[in-house]
Image: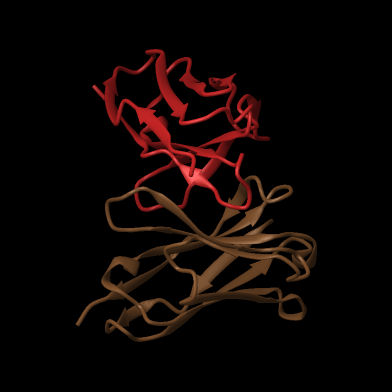
Amino acid sequence: DIQMTQSPSSLSASVGDRVTITCQASQDISNYLNWYQQKPGKAPKLLIYDASNLETGVPSRFSGSGSGTDFTFTISSLQPEDIATYYCQQYDNLPQWTFGGGTKVEIK
Amino acid sequence: EVQLVESGGGLVKPGGSLRLSCAASGFTFSSYSMNWVRQAPGKGLEWVSSISSSSSYIYYADSVKGRFTISRDNAKNSLYLQMNSLRAEDTAVYYCARDLQYGTTADYWGQGTLVTVSS
């Protein structure tokens, strides 16, 4: 099974800060990685697919990069509405998906 | 507008059964694979099961294999999850999610339904 290690598990940043989350796969998954945002009490929302493609309607301050085993998710300028938990998800070993443990983002 | 609405959650005793439903609207349901993903209280996301558009391909996580059955009725635009032999560790919010393409990505999610397994 492919394991996804996400870090940090939580972070606190100020409005306007650049925020970076990393996700490491236990084996090469090419670019088969998505990023989701989950606000408290809500369902997850797709932000980035195929490692770096921005889902339609998602603000451009969100971005993703990486391939192979190491991936990065960035919020270029943190906004109050970005308070949420972010998850990476791999789909290399279809049909099973594996999610990272999540990163809780808070405002300092 | 794509909408997915889950129902059927509730409190059930260990060993009991429950059937979840997901009503889809706003898209051609019969053209998309669908998934169930769950989230235990305060925990992360766990993929549970997937079903292809015509029900030809069905897959389960090892943690539910042999106990859960996914199905769909394209005429009724509905997805189902029959859960038998429920355990305390099955307690979670269960989300249905539409697959964007080829079983890779959940592009729309329902609001979830809570299943609590407790005596």
Residue A66: image location, x then y, percent: 57, 19
- Tell me what residue is drawn at x 73 percent, y 71 percent: B55
Measured as percent of width and height from the top left, residue B113 is found at 42, 68
In the image: residue B40, left or right of residue B29: left
Q: Front-most of B27 and B55?
A: B55
Q: Nearer the viewer, residue B26 or B76?
A: B76
Q: Quadrant of residue A57?
A: top right
Going 67% across and 57% down the picture, which residue do you hit?
B2
Residue A100 visible somewhere in the drawing:
yes
Count of marks, rendered view: 0
Nearest the viewer among A41 and B12 is: B12
Q: Is residue A10 left or right of residue A95?
A: left
Residue B80 visible? The answer is no
Question: Is A5 above or below relative to A78?
Answer: below
Drawn side of residue B50 relative to residue B111, left or right: right
Indicate the colouring scheme.
by chain
Residue B104, compared with residue B21, is above or below; it is above
A49 lies above or below A67: below
Q: Quadrant of residue A50?
A: top right
Chain that is coloured red in the picture: A
Identify which residue is drawn at 70% across, 60% down.
Answer: B33
User: Residue B44, how many percent across, how many down?
Assistant: 36, 48
Give x and y (percent) for residue B47.
Answer: 49, 55
- Chain B: its colour in the image is brown
Q: Quadrant of the C terminus of chain A?
A: top left
